[in-house]
Image: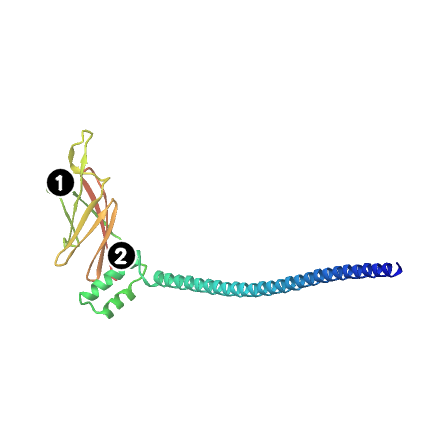
Amino acid sequence: MTLGLHESRLRQRRRRRLAILKWVFVLGALLFAGYYAYETGSALAQQEVRDLRREIDRLRGSVAELTNAREELAREVEAARDREEQWAERYRRDVPTGETKELFALVQDRLSSGVPADRLAFVIGATSTAASCDGRPETKRFIVPTPIYQGANDSVGFANSTIRITARGESAINRNGNPEAWFDPAKPITVTFASLGGKSSEVSGMLPLHHSVVKGENEYRFTIAAGNRGFVNVTGDRCDYP
């Protein structure tokens, strides 16, 4: 009886020990699994942090490169603008326009015609803003021919008739829409200056018009204005040239 009870108690102790060992094993396994999971997650997190830092460094490098490229591009743009402004200023300074362009073309024409450059330089250098003129202007008038009128008294002469002046105009239109014999002073006309033994020149536009003709050491300055119906008045004066 006593022996059986003793064995029963031994079996109960063994079962309790086994149960405790099982729980210790399970708890150890759980702790190990938790520790392994923690270490694995920590390693992964650290690796991800390292990857992110490398990516941040790469992006910072890219940003720095882009910033440098932008600054370089801005410098190139600014330099290009400076060059453009320099060329524009040089163009404005070196390329003649307006009256200067006309004078440059005239100089080229004279040079191509065989006039020596030193002669042109002398003439230009001797020119002054204060012209020496006779101060005795003479006014003459003549009829301006039109497409339907070609008559007498259609020219005048100056400088002892060595300069002959004629003109062409458009017919005036009456209220019925029909052309008249006289010219319309409100429309452009063309005035021709023919020099005896020289070449002719023309000036066109709205009246009044201004023109000059050079003959040797004389410059004849003319003003053409509208006169009585069908007529223009020409006022001429002689000045020293150059």
Coordinates of residue 44 in the picture (x, y in percent)? 61, 63
- Given residues 231 and 14, the one toward you in this image is 14
The amino acid marked with disc number 2 is Cys
Q: How many marks do you count on the picture? A: 2
Query: Residue furthest toward the front?
Result: 1
- Dot 1 falls on a residue whose secondary structure is loop
Q: What coloring was used for the rendering?
A: rainbow
The residue shown at (19%, 48%) is: 191
- Mark 2 or mark 1, which is nearer the start of the sequence? 2
Q: Are marks 1 and 2 in contact (CB under 8 Å)?
A: no
| Residue 242 figure quarter | bottom left
Give the alpha-carbon distance from disc 1 to disc 2, as whole Å: 37 Å
Name the foreground residue: 47 vs 189. 47
Measured along the vertical axis of the image, is residue 180 above or below residue 24?
above
> Element type at marker 2?
loop
> Going 70% across and 62% down the picture, which residue do you hit?
29
Query: Measuring 18% from the left and 29% from the top, which residue is drawn there?
Result: 176
Residue 86 lies, in percent from the top left, at: 39, 64
Kindly indicate the quadrant of the structure image that contains residue 39: bottom right
Q: Which mark is residue 134?
A: none
- Residue 221 percent across, percent down from the top left: 24, 53
* Residue underneath mark 1: 147
What residue did someone put label 2 on? 133
- Indicate the amino acid at tag 1: Pro
47 horizontally vs 175: left or right:
right
Circle 1 packing at 10 Å, graded few (<14), some (14-19), many (20+), is: some
Residue at position x 28%, y 59% in the image: 101
Crowd rating for badge 2 (residues with CA inside 10 Å; few <14, some 14–19, many 20+): some
Q: Nearer the viewer, mark 1 or mark 2?
A: 1
